[in-house]
Image (spheres, rainbow, N blue to C red):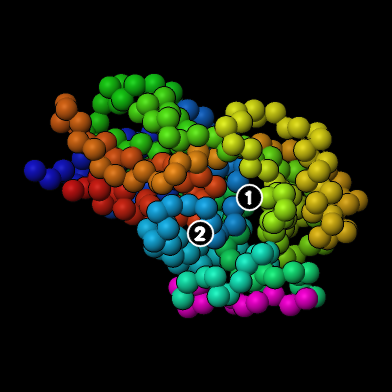
């Protein structure tokens, strides 16, 4: 028996995955409420560096499909960057080669080519990719959802039995460890440093093959976001001054003008990493339907719209 397409849906989780899913559902005619433990501005999504690229997310084939759907949306949103927080920005993916990418990349990614020696010392790819200012984008998502007739409620959910709706969509990220007892989702801590932009207009993301350290900087107008770290199973949300200094040092080695940039702030977020994204429909014993959409790691922005559309389809079966 199918679900009433106009029936109530509660989306649990108010980060980029939850809000994007809620938008798709609400705009399809569903009555949707978002229950979130904290406002979007205080979620892990608000801390994200937020460069679009399908990296370190499985299953690979599905992730690429979700990512390309999202890319199409972001390209449209980039026409209104001040409103949506989305811009198309050029930069270098370090330690990457064209022949390592699938045919999808050359066919679909704007401006993709090998980087020159002047652009990057080493092997890299030059590309024009969506870069999101997450606080702006999350506000825009929430406003779009509210315009579609949705409602956002700040409330903590600890038991699914407390969520009284015919359809529940679980977009809780790390919260799924407790809500659905899934110990397969775990934190990978990321620390960022925000500095005054000394004039950098392109982004760069690089990985040291010897240490595995990831170094990146993303320009957002007069701010520059520097990263980063990937500390597995680390739950600390407190910035580490020594780590922050090391991040600035690594970024300055790639762009010397960053060394003297004034520090504006520090951010820490816990990526909800899982071996594979959990995106599936689960009928509950009491007749409700539970749709899971979590475990995107650091690629939530990259796959948000593709996953949201699939979750919405599962919710309407």
Dividing the picture into quarters, in which one does residue 235 lie?
A: top right
- Dot 1: element: loop
Closest to the camera, between mark 1 and mark 2, is 2
Residue placed furthest toward the front: 210
Instruction: Please report the residue visible at 53 percent of the width from the left and 56 percent of the height from the top.
Output: 55
Which one is nearer the viewer's eye here, 117 or 72? 117
Q: Which mark is residue 253?
A: none
Residue placed furthest toward the left: 1
**Is residue 24 magenta-colored?**
no
In the drawing, does residue 133 fall left or right of residue 142?
Answer: right
The magenta segment = 104-117
In the drawing, does residue 18 fall left or right of residue 54?
Answer: left
Residue 34 at x, y percent in the picture: 39, 36
- The total number of labels drawn is 2
Instruction: Please report the residue visible at 24 percent of the width from the left and 38 percent of the height from the top.
Output: 282
- Dot 2: element: loop
In the drawing, does residue 290 fall left or right of residue 86?
Answer: left
- According to the image, label 1 marks what residue? 49
**Is residue 113 magenta-colored?**
yes
Instruction: Please report the residue visible at 75 percent of the width from the left and 65 percent of the height from the top.
Output: 201
Which one is nearer the viewer's eye here, 86 or 92? 92
């Amino acid at each position: 028996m199918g679900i009433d397409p106009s029936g109530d849906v509660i989306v649990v989780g108010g980060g980029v995955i939850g809000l994007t899913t809620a938008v798709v559902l609400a705009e399809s005619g569903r009555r949707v409420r978002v229950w979130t433990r904290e406002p979007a501005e205080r979620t892990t999504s608000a801390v994200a560096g937020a460069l679009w690229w399908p990296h370190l997310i499985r299953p690979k084939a599905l992730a690429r499909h979700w990512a390309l759907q999202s890319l199409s949306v972001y390209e449209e949103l980039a026409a209104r960057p001040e409103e949506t927080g989305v811009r198309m920005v050029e930069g270098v993916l370090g330690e990457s080669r064209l022949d390592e990418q699938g045919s999808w990349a050359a066919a679909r990614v704007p401006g993709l080519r090998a980087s020159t020696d002047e652009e990057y010392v080493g092997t890299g790819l030059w590309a024009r990719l969506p870069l999101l200012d997450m606080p702006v984008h999350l506000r825009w998502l929430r406003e779009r959802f509210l315009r579609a007739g949705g409602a956002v409620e700040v409330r903590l959910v600890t038991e699914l039995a407390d969520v009284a709706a015919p359809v529940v969509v679980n977009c809780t990220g790390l919260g799924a460890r407790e809500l659905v007892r899934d110990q397969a989702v775990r934190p990978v801590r990321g620390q960022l440093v925000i500095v005054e932009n000394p004039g950098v207009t392109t982004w760069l993301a690089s990985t040291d093959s010897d240490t595995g350290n990831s170094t990146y900087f993303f320009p957002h107008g007069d701010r520059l976001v520097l990263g980063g770290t990937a500390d597995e199973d680390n739950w600390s949300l407190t910035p580490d001054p020594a780590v922050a200094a090391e991040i600035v040092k690594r970024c300055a080695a790639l762009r010397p003008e960053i060394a003297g940039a004034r520090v504006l702030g520090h951010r820490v977020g816990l990526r909800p990493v899982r071996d594979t994204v959990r995106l599936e429909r689960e009928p509950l014993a009491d007749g409700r339907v539970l749709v899971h959409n979590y475990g995107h790691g650091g690629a939530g922005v990259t796959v948000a719209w593709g996953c949201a559309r699939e979750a919405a389809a599962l919710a309407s079966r």
